[in-house]
Image: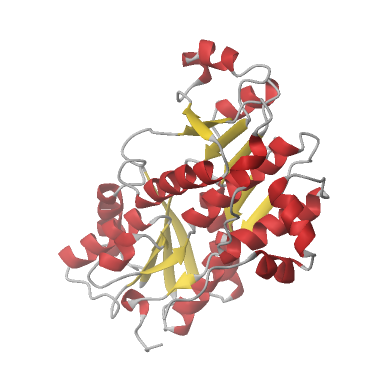
Amino acid sequence: MTSRSPTIRDVAERAGVSVTTVSHVYSGKRKVASETTARVLRVGAEIGYHPDGVARTLASGRSTTIALEIELAGGNFLLNPYFSSVMSALSVAAIENGFTFALLPNDPNDGESVRAALRPRGVAGAIIVEPTASNRWIPALLEDGVRVVTIGRYPIALETSWVDNDHRSGMKEAVEHLAGQGYGRIALLSVHERTSLVVDLESAFDEATTELELAGRTVFMGDLVEASARDITHEILGSRNPPDAIIGVIDRVAVGIMQAASERGVSVPGDLGVIGVGDTVLSRLSDPPFTSIQSTPNELAHAAVQLLRAIWLDPEMPDSQILLPAELKVRASTLRRGT
């Protein structure tokens, strides 16, 4: 028996507002306070509510094209299941909301004619996926007066709207879970490139290991790929006081950790606990399946498009933020003492 789809009444009840208010948020027929709009959109994203017929409200003669930017450097985009899920969900959400996408070049200096075409009202707004601190499009778009919504927060102090998962809470839950399973020496494999994901995971890891009086250390890799994670894992497992648990900042890193453990004859989870981030197909297909901190690409994508749509309908709407839960999905790679 399948569960029913969430309704507008479900959103209204959980958000603590009327059905009429929820309708106005999604239809744009009347202005709703920005705080209420953000709360309604967050609840809608959390429960998977997709309004019907919203595309009909966009017949105003204004641009319905969203500028989309995602960094394609190296193999991180093409081989990371998270990004393919985000892109697929963004496409669906755009169609449902009456928008189309225009993919931006990686660097605004490589596409000055493209940047000029965005002014003054060439696009409805822009969505930037998992921006790094070195992202060049966000300051350029803001300078040109284009409203920006990011999936993952921009690590620089510029005003944007954003949607994100609460990976800080997910990391704290992960460290507490490892402590409960008897792990006491925990390493976090991270990178120097600054994204909100990396910053949140590192800070929450430091806080959680300190609070629980565990031995925690962050080890930096060159790239977020399996080979780099495999090499650094071999190095730290061969050290004098190796960790008994390792957390990778994305699932691809956890795959490399698992490979190194297998090659060294290290038992998972008996000798080594392994956790990834993303809860992608990689975590479920691993042998053994590994525990992972959840990301919700489908919910993030729909929330980003609907938030940008709310801004499109009300250009005076202040920047808003939507933080969605990130639960720990426990699997065999950390279960030394059972569930």
Going 67% across and 21% down the picture, which residue do you hit?
A: 121
Is 107 or 30 nearer to us in this picture?
Answer: 30
Q: Is residue 186 left or right of residue 287?
A: right
Q: In this view, does 322 lie to the left or right of 178?
A: right
Indicate whether 319 appears above or below 100: below
Is 215 or 283 nearer to us in this picture?
Answer: 283
Indicate whether 46 appears above or below 225: below
Q: In which quarter of the image is residue 223?
A: top left
> How many numbered markers are drawn?
0
Is 16 or 281 nearer to us in this picture?
Answer: 16
Look at the image and tell me in which quarter the C terminus lies.
bottom left
Going 79% across and 57% down the picture, which residue do you hit?
A: 21
- The color scheme shown is secondary structure
Going 62% across and 47% down the picture, which residue do you hit?
A: 54
Q: Quadrant of residue 316?
A: top right
Residue 159 appears in the figure: no
Q: Position of residue 225 (x, y in %)?
A: 31, 47
Q: Position of residue 289 (x, y in %)?
A: 29, 71
Residue 35 appears in the figure: yes
Q: In this view, does 1 lie to the left or right of 309?
A: left
Q: Where is residue 228 in the image (x, y as percent from the top left)?
A: 29, 48
Indicate whether 193 appears above or below 246: above
